Amino acid sequence: MTFATLETLIDRSGRGEQGFWDTVHDTMSEALIVVTPDRRIVYGNESARKILNITLEEARGRPCLESMECPQCGCACKLFENGGVHDLEVVLYTPERRVFRKNARLLKDADGQVLGGVETFVDVTEEQSERVELERRAELLHTERKRSDALLKEVSEGVFALDPELRIKDYSPAMHTLTGFTPEEANGQPFFELLGLPAPDVTELEALADRSQDAVVTRKSGRPQSVQLRFLPLRFGSEDVMGLMRPAAPQAPEVERLEREYGFAGMLSRASVMRDLFRLLESVADTEANIMIQGESGTGKELVARAIHSLSGRRTHPFYAVNCATFTGSLLLSELFGHERGAFTGAYKTQRGKLELAERGTLLLDEVSEIPLQHQALLLRVLESRRFERVGGTESIPLHARVVAAANQDLMQAVEQGRLRSDLFFRLNVIPVRIPPLRERPEDIEILLRYFLWKANTRGKPAHPIPPAVLDALTAYPWPGNVRELKNVAEYLCFICEDGIRLKDLPAHILHRGAAPSSAPLPACTPSAPTPAAELDERARILAALETHHYKKAKAATTLGMDRTTLWRKMRRLGIDDR
């Protein structure tokens, strides 16, 4: 097939008012040329003239290598050898050295004889530049990641990064050693809940920045691990949080002795009522029956729930705690059951709830009586059917977690008042567990105070002996905040007493109640039925704490040995204005 023959065929195919090649010439945006088997140009459209900077008059009959200065013509372009070219990137030797994506197919007659080839070119210079830049950045990120990973492996401290929702975003190998959770298990999980730590709010987290604090995390095995936590003022992103974790300093021999003699699953007691409680926990830990923990604020309801978890066969699976009083009805449903994307305003992505996250582990529902009545029936149905759906979803999800409930008030009274469904109460209260308040076990005050003083000693302060007069005053005090309040008092004494603990060093509200200690046993009272005198004393203590901290409730609650929700509820009950 000669050049003239192919040219004649092309010319004939374009005859008529608007032939095929005329259409190609005028309308096709891609550069198109037709070449003979020996790679001489026969035809080029208007786009070829503009894009490839050639004219048909100049190029016709000349090899495409000469006309377009295409270096691939003699090597990479295998149009006639392979029968086509697909997405071949070529650089034309023009002043701009632009990059084109080339595609080509053979042109055959009716008998299958090769007449030539049709080639198209698309300018991809900008696209390739962007791709090269992306590849360069990806390589830089990969290199930096390798460097940071190598550095993290050399750092003995655990390093972690949290996203704005305080979920684990990054996690070093040392964190695996400290917690027992692998990076794969930890990534995406709520940091504080995964490790059994109380979750701070944003202001509390900012206050902790660049400060070390002692903490006890719960390892994957369920065993406690004493650590030091430090949140850094550095940010990976606009809202991400970075932190460090290291093993706590070796404990004093006295701390180890107290834990060895009186310790049980993170709790400490020598009182017979508490030893009975410990035996009960051991016996019910591996049952599947629902457990209801009742105890006043500060007695350690979550510690008891964690003890049940760590003593059970579920100890290697997650433990989560939800304070039902801190969520409104709709938010509580999302927290427990999760939600699908678009289920409500602000639901930008699908999120699993605590019932799903606690897969084969334990979920504590604290302050269960605060669940709105309209949602109690839904929770009851889930507990009975062992299945649930996410908010806005239709998929039925099996419930494999064990549910433990807790409350700091008389639940039978809540049932009688219509605030708690009786059927839900009886479903949750299969095995009732009551935690005695600290005033019912005064023999624990001394060992707990010694323990907390010695724990504070790891921060560089000496553990002072406790004079009898101080111990008498502490024993006479009713401890409405229970063990949590005693711990706060111990830390207070440790930091203000330079030369030993004296009676006058005790907080004023304790001195007032303990000035004339009585040998008679303290009257048994419950949060739901306090005496008028006790209410007046409690009101005075709360007002004093609020005034001291300028009505900042988080700080006042810490001073009083209770959480903010409990403080808010007591303020409402005692008629204290929320300024």
Image (cartoon, rainbow, N blue to C red):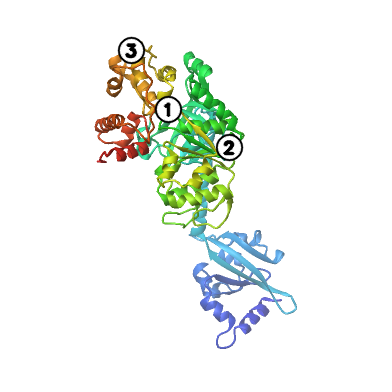
Q: x, y (%) of residue 231?
A: 41, 33
Q: How far apart are marks 3 and 2 (CA)?
A: 47 Å
Task: State whether residue 7 is above or below residue 540.
Answer: below
Q: Residue 437 carries which label?
A: 1
In the image, what residue type sits under mark 3?
A: Ala
x 27%, y 39%: residue: 575
The front one of 148 and 314 is 314
- Rendered-image quadrant of the N terminus: bottom right
In the image: residue 550, left or right of residue 468 = left
Is disc 3 surrounded by few (<14), some (14 to 19) or many (20+) residues within 10 Å? some
Q: Residue 317 carries which label?
A: 2
The front one of 423 and 397 is 423
**Sequence order check: which comes first, mark 2 or mark 1?**
2
Task: State whether residue 378 is above or below residue 262.
Answer: below
In the image: residue 579, left or right of residue 414 = left
In the image, what residue type sits under mark 1?
A: Pro
- SS class, disc 2: loop
x 42%, y 30%: residue: 230
- SS class, disc 3: helix
In the image, what residue type sits under mark 2?
A: His
